[in-house]
Each structure stands twice: as C-alpha cells, then as structure tokens.
Image: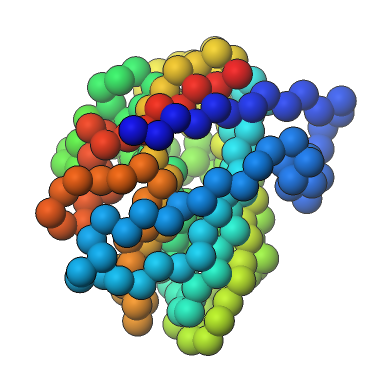
Amino acid sequence: MKTLIVKKVTPNSPVSLSETGTLLETATEQIAIDVLNWEKDFPYRPGLKFRIAHTGDEIWLKYYVNEKNILAQETRTNGDVYKDSTVEFFISVDGKSYYNFEFNCIGTIHIGHGEGRHNRTPIEPAIAEKIKIESTLGNRPFAEKSGNFDWEMMIRIPIECFTFDKLKTLNGLKATGNFYKCGDETSDPHFVTWNPIGTENPDYHCPEYFGVIEFE
C-alpha cells in the first residue's frame, strides 16, 4: 500500500487558477499514475502524473496527461464522465464511505458518496460546481480525436464538497484514497491507477485497495 503526504501551502493572498498551478509546480513533486492492474485485457497505458497540495480548506490537484485519443461528450454535472477521457480522485475521510471525484478532460464533474459502487448518493450540483477547474483542452464538448495529445487540468476542491462529513479543516487529516485515469468509450479503453487494485476485472470502487493519504 502506497502512502502519500499532502503538503500544506499557504498563499499570502487569494490566487487564480493559473497562479495555483504555478505554486504547485514550485512546492510539490510530480507523482506517477502508472499501474496497469488489468494489462492482459487493457494494455494501453497513457502517460499520467499529478501534483497535490492543500490549504486547509481546499485541495489543489493538477493532472498531466499524454494519450492517443481524447473524447469529451458529457457536459452534465454528475453525468457519465467516465466514458470520456477522464481523471479521477477517490477519497475516504472516515474509513467507511468515500467520495468519487471524476473529471472529464473538459472539466465536467461527477461526485458521488457511499460505501461501495452501488447506492451512491450524488453531491448536489450547486455544491459540486464550487470546484474550480481549468483544462488546457477548454470546456466545450467534442467527438473523439486521435493522434498524440498532451493536456493538463488544474482542480481546486473546496472543503464544502465533503458534505457528508462536515469537515472543518484538512489540516492533519488522515485519509485513504486512490487516483485514476480511464476512458471507457475511447478507441483505447484504459484503466490506470496510482495504488494497485487486486480485482479480476476493472473496478475503481474498491476502498480496500486505497492507499494512505496524510494531509500536513
């Protein structure tokens, strides 16, 4: 099981999304998401790294992606973003239930909460849309494009999104979680993870395979 220490950053003043990215570049190291748990059936591995930090009341997360096919059709909050070129962050703050934060490559958001894959409760769109996102691919939907694509996504998740736990601060939080990339309906379906998953078939809703995430 991997362990990730999430560094705390303290901006001197309110910062824009682009300034957030610059601060992350300065303060944190890139971490690879490169585990192919189901390589026999899904051998494609896109290039994928991320950086993460927190401010006490926000999680800052930036993904760096290189892949052959990009797809962005879902525009509905809490829609089926996993079918597109998507990055994901699952986290449990209580050791029982967990949140699945999913973002397609144009920043469409899906957030659910629950103890497993089934009977998940979506986060209210008005809360989910407080997340600030900027993708280098823009925010307009498009059909699949094939070639060689590099894209980045900056994400700021406010503590209000943890609506079922009513967290007061991220300082000192001991959590578990995992980071993913998928693209179920792209020409090269893929399932890549940060912490390994030991299921027979692709399944990200496996909190028993989460790694340790500790916030400074």
Q: Is residue 94 visible?
A: yes
Q: Which residue lies at the image location 44% right of the left edge and 30% below the top edge?
A: 3
Q: Which residue lies at the image location 46% right of the left edge and 52% below the top edge?
A: 33
At which x and y percent is residue 77? 44, 53
Q: Is residue 79 visible?
A: no
On screen, residue 108 above or below 15: below
> Which residue is most to the right?
12
On screen, residue 35 above or below 197: below
Which picture quadrant has residue 215?
top right
At which x and y percent is residue 178? 39, 40
Classify the position of the N terminus by image quarter: top left
Looking at the picture, the colour scheme in use is rainbow
On screen, residue 171 above or below 70: above
Q: Which residue lies at the image location 36% right of the left edge and 72% below the top edge?
A: 44
> Which residue is most to the left?
200
Residue nearer the viewer, 84 or 7: 7
At which x and y percent is residue 11? 81, 28
Left or right of residue 75: residue 164 = left
Left or right of residue 163: residue 80 = left
Q: Which residue lies at the image location 23% right of the left edge and 61% below the top edge?
A: 38
Residue nearer the viewer, 35 or 24: 35
Left or right of residue 182: residue 67 = right
Classify the position of the C terminus by image quarter: top right
Which picture quadrant has residue 64?
bottom right
At which x and y percent is residue 127? 50, 36
